[in-house]
Image (cartoon, helix red, strand yellow):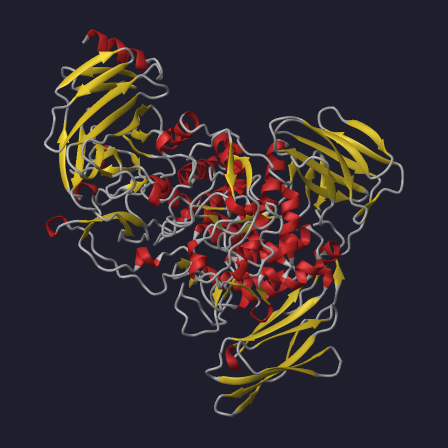
Amino acid sequence: MKRIFFFLMMIAGVFPVAAQVKLGNNGQDIEWYSKGKAYIFSPEFTVLYSETDPALALKPAGIDKVPYNVPTWKTDASKADYHQQRINESVAGDGFDDKILRSKKEIRTASIYHVGHSVTIKPDKVWAKGDTVYFHFANQEGFSLQAWLVKSQPYPAMGFLLTPRKQGYYSVGYTGAPSFEKQETTESWQPLVWTEKRTPDQPYLTPAFMATEPVTLVSDGVNSLGVLAHPRYLPFQPLPLLDNSQFGVALLNAKAQLQSQVFAPIPGGLHSFMKAGATFGFSFYLLVTPHTITDTYEQIARNIFGFSDYRTNATVSMNTTLDNLIDYAKTHYAWFVDSLKGFAYSTDVPGAVKNVSSLNPLELAIIRDDKELFEKRAYPLMEFMLSREKFLFSLDSTQKIQSPSRKLRGPIAPLSELGVLHSVFPGNDYLYTTLAKREFTKTRVRNLDVEEKGSNWINALFLFKMTGDSTYLTMSRKMADAYLEKRVDQRMEAFGDPMISTHFFWPTFTNNWSALLELYELTKEERYLKAAHDGARHYALFTWMVPAVPDSLITVNKGGKAPMYWYLKSKGHQQMYYPEEKVPAWRVSEVGLTPESSGTATGHRGIFMSTFAPWMLRIGYYTKDDFLIQIAKASLVGRSASFPGYHMNTERTTAYEKPDFPLHEHKAQSVNSFHYNHILPMASLFMDYLASDAYIKSGGRIHFPNDYIEGYAYLQNKFYGHKKGSFMGSDQVQLWMPARLLKIGDIGLNYIAARKEDSLFIAFANQSAHPIQTTVTVNPVWVRFPGNTVMTVLGEKKQEEALKDSSFTITVPANGQTAVVLKGAVVTSAFQDQLLQPVADKSRDYLSISEGNAKALLFKLGGYGRRLFVYLEDDDTKWSSVRLQYRIGKSKPAVISKNSYPFEFTVAADRQQPVFFSLILTGTDGRTVRTKEYELGQRTISINVKNR
């Protein structure tokens, strides 16, 4: 026994000083001491056996307020505890698997302990040899078992070897970790949905392919404890799926206590069928850490799975990707339906369109000085967002999938979006403030069937930013502090929280940390940053840290075929072809991404819409949290050369990396889903990341004021370009990044650019772990250097040199930034200046018309012009046709006719003349109604040349 004690004390040497491990109870228990507390790990195993196939199948768990799929098995009636869920017909489309949701009714169990026959055993002998402690178990009727504990770093490893004595389906669970009553814990975690103090209502198993780390954790407020599957059982190839999952982890034990457990193999899964005399081995780590659960998650990621700053630009820079994305968004391949003013959503809902926000194309049109993008995407989406009832719009009144609307009962734009539009176009003071204040008093369903209450601390914050009325800021702080007390200071014990009634996308499972960061950046009050940091750390639990990325090449696109996503195959899509190639494994790793949602995690493994990345960058910078900064980078950098589609799902491929990947018709896409309404939000994501990366790499010295793009689900980003910022000591600098502004010799560099008078400012960000020296050429289409141009490298020691032409050499340190200013530049810009020209215009811009329940809006677009937009809330059940008769100033009247729904009209208005108009409505009963003549836009122009 002395040898055993000595061995275990050597194990303790790999832990913090506070941790000590030894054997107790005559060698039957492993006693672990950490931070003054003792924990008992018993060498106890539970072996499950089923003579026949238990028919493993994923089924909806039936958790209140949360769609989530869990493993279930066939069982006898006495053990049946799974009740087939009735699935609403609106729950359908991409990501929802009918084989899971709508399979036939069977007698099943969702409890791992109710699968077949089970026996729990403990050792009758213990001895040590070298670095290993062995545990001997008495032979059982159906099997024999051996187990051992090995000194290893950073945690001791336990392994077992099962030898069946009869043929059948087996699973071995380690069930000897310390157990706790829920009230004894401060927090626990089981991937994917059980976070904070939310715990399973029965012993559900999380299969390996659904575990962002293969462990469950329990914290008593002093230490976190867990049982962690060894990485070798979660290989990089093939892509993890249920069919190749070799184990599962659980949190709730058979006594309804919280206890970290691992079961291998999964009953009815890979390797579970065994013949008599065969052997099955498995190993796992035992851990006790003096850290919180989120810190332990980071420790496991780094120490076991090797997470680090592992990505760089793979085939192109992020700026090239952004250029290609915007080019793609203008093509017919992006499937923008002009007549419906939205992006097709036929991947999920046939015949529907769906938009996220008008702010994405508006921001990009401003920053990129892109008139075409404004006219073809931004302005139509502004009309959509102010008129539609829901983000998902379908003229088909019988369509039920994802609960679309065909009504024009807007605005669907969140209050925050109204505030940003007001900030960009301050002339529309009455229009946006009237709608925003109205939304503050309402409850509205914008997406799916989720109700949103208007009167909350987030909307109060944006009303303050919009109006400058400090009453709203006081209200926001007061409500936000109450939110912190109820939602952040207390861990959630059940699903639902003070602002979220149901859960689906991951932001609903954490506190609203992006909005809390907005409040912090406005007030600089540390409690809001602390809460945002806590939310971001918990959000990290949804990011993949597995499988470990091998330092090797892997073969993809075997036989010249790209993967075929089963959902698209079922819809008749065609196979895509890309050359077979060998690439470094890191390029096709999901580490840093998240699955889509609780309800679709089984099919959408890693989504590319990682809009959380810039928020994590900033929070990581403010709190000195490198883990968040590295997750942010891992989720976005080096993943695509254009729009990559939505997700990884079946196997690893480089298809997403190809510039032409999205340039195919819808039915010619086979690799993954295309949600066309995501294209421009992804472009905003890239812009936000580039600006945030420059901000943190410069220590805050490159800063552009920004606003909030709320969108829906997880599609939040910052909005840039409408306000001038600071650049390494220069103020009133305008962010300006037109298409292909720079040609850079090394793809490892990203950049942001800005302008002021005759100076062009550029910040180069190195995404690689080595210094880069390369040549940069400025595109003469956008900038000319007629002579006497001076390049100054900005920083503590400024360096100046004369430029002979439009090219220069730059050196950027590893993972660092170099900023320059080119003085003596002649910039070609027209649209950006026009749109942002501050024009004083107090004319009337909004009115309601009783006939047809019509609304008339006058969009004031700075120095660019004005637009009249009129729409009817009444539909074609009441009116068969509608005519708009209008005249601008004293011009001759003109008429626009609409003989089909939706009844809406757009008129390009003069900057100085008012618009006079009336409506002529023809009812389905043949009667005609004519309104009086209305007027909008009577004013006197006064141009304010003062800087914004």
> Percent from the top left, x then y, of residue 887?
70, 80
* Residue 133 position by quadrant: top left
Q: Is residue 139 above or below residue 521?
A: above
Residue located 27% across and 23% down the image: 158
Q: Is residue 617 above or below residue 347?
A: above
Between 925 and 347, the one nearer to me in the picture? 347
Residue located 76% across and 43% down the image: 756
Query: Which image quarter is the N terminus in?
Result: top left
On screen, residue 698 versus residue 225, left or right, reads: right
Q: Is residue 676 above or below residue 510?
A: below
The answer to whether one can see residue 137 in this image is: yes
The answer to whether one can see residue 486 in this image is: no
**Which residue of the protein is positioned furthest toward the bottom in this rendering?**
926
* Residue 342 position by quadrant: bottom right
**Which residue of the protein is positioned furthest toward the right in this rendering?**
787
> Percent from the top left, x then y, of residue 282?
28, 29
On screen, residue 604 versus residue 635, left or right, reads: left
> Percent from the top left, x then y, of residue 338?
60, 68
> Percent from the top left, x then y, of residue 505?
41, 50
How many numbered circles are shown? 0
